[in-house]
Image: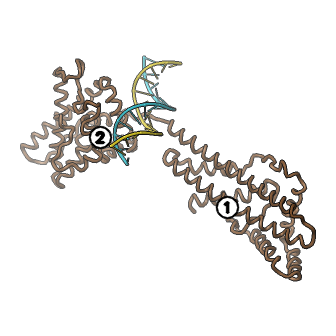
Chain colours: A brown, B yellow, C cyan
Amino acid sequence: MDEQSRMLQTLAGVNLAGHSVQGGMALPPPHGHEGADGDGRKQDIGDILHQIMTITDQSLDEAQAKKHALNCHRMKPALFSVLCEIKEKTGLSIRGAQEEDPPDPQLMRLDNMLLAEGVSGPEKDYRAKLTQIRQIYHTELEKYEQACNEFTTHVMNLLREQSRTRPISPKEIERMVGIIHRKFSSIQMQLKQSTCEAVMILRSRFLDARRKRRNFSKQATEILNEYFYSHLSNPYPSEEAKEELAKKCSITVSQVSNWFGNKRIRYKKNIGKFQEEANLYAAKTAVTAAHAVAAAVQNNQTNSPTTPNSGSSGSFNLPNSGDMFMNMQSLNGDSYQGSQVGANVQSQVDTLRHVINQTGGYNDGLGGNSLYSPHNLNANGGWQDATTPSSVTSPTEGPGSVHSDTSN
DNA sequence: TGACATGATTGAGG
DNA sequence: CCTCAATCATGTCA
């Protein structure tokens, strides 16, 4: 049985059976609510009620015979007690019929169940859980209304039948119907309360999850920063690159997206603050670049398949990841490795050039202390070509195209 | 404890 | 759906 149907079933069981007893009035369940227990009792009651309902259409003699049969029925006392309670209620003031309901363990059970449905990952699909609760709520509400109508009909038929043997005023019938309706509406109120509580709890858990922020590991941040600063001219990782970064950092793709979104904004807002960081990562990548240049030169000369330089140990191997790699990989099936090296060279030469320029003390126009300048930041503070994120462009760049990272 | 850093969310815009 | 920009809420550090 799936979770939802289990929940629905329990909901039906709890509220229709459980709550009805609580108020002191044993409501016989209407047709279609036999539940999972499947005992014959409810079926019996249904049969009895059915018989009662058909009685009025029969002749008096026949009805008397039926009545006799019903009187002898083993379920008669139970049904009789229902009528007694209704009758008892009519003697009470209709005003103030809404007596206080004590805390209900069934209600708590319901809440716990709803909670259990949402504990696996509240932040994942809050809306889905909300929809689920809404569906259950509407289903149950519909059931209550149906049950109320059915039960009212049953009672009215009973009274109509009784009116043949004793005087029953229309007002009395009206009162009884009122009692039934109030009883059902109090149950409905409990359903609404339960739903409200479930939604509140779901929401608070969702917010809790949001508040529980954890900083990424140092290694993860380094990996992300290395990618960011080596793709500074176009720091928009493709979907594939994001996935790879996510894998390497042990975070989700959306976290990678968040990180890049925050990073771009904050970098752009305060370039000066990030210069030191940029220099650090540029220098770091430069080491890799130097190796790659050497390897590539050798590779080009000998034209022999060389293993691309893996970069500094333990660090994110930029050439082997990110959109650059993806692009080159798609160049021509078998020989992608060579192309990849070429791309690596381009990228890393780019980085190397940065470092050389910086350490040489060239002022690139951003001010005296400016060592690392984001050349591709346009006048508006946006990245040039950044209007077309690489998630779109990168994987579809044509063969031989060089990522804009290398345009510096 | 306050300031700053940082990950996540939200709403607008394309 | 993605990005930007603003913002929130928590983590970190002096």
Residue A408's spot in the image, x, y percent? Answer: 18, 33
- Seen in the picture, residue C8 relative to A369 is either above or below; the reply is below
- Quarter of the rendering containing residue A343: top left
Count of marks placed on residues: 2
Residue A19's spot in the image, x, y percent? Answer: 75, 55
Front tag of 2 and 1 = 1
Front-most of A27 and A218?
A27
The residue wearing badge 2 is A236
Residue A164's spot in the image, x, y percent? Answer: 90, 73
- Seen in the picture, residue A178 relative to A264 is either above or below; the reply is below
Q: Chain of mark 2?
A: A
For residue A257, side relative to residue A344 (left or right): right
The kind of residue on which mark 1 rests is Lys
For residue A207, side relative to residue A72 (left or right): left
Residue A165's spot in the image, x, y percent? Answer: 92, 72
Q: Chain of mark 1?
A: A
Which numbered disc flags the more N-terminal residue, 2 or 1?
1
The kind of residue on which mark 2 rests is Tyr
Q: Secondary structure at mark 2?
A: loop
Can the viewer see residue A86 in this picture? yes
Front-most of A300 and A122?
A122
> Distance of mark 2 from mark 1, alpha carbons?
53 Å
Q: Which of the numbered marks, if any, corresponds to residue A143?
A: 1
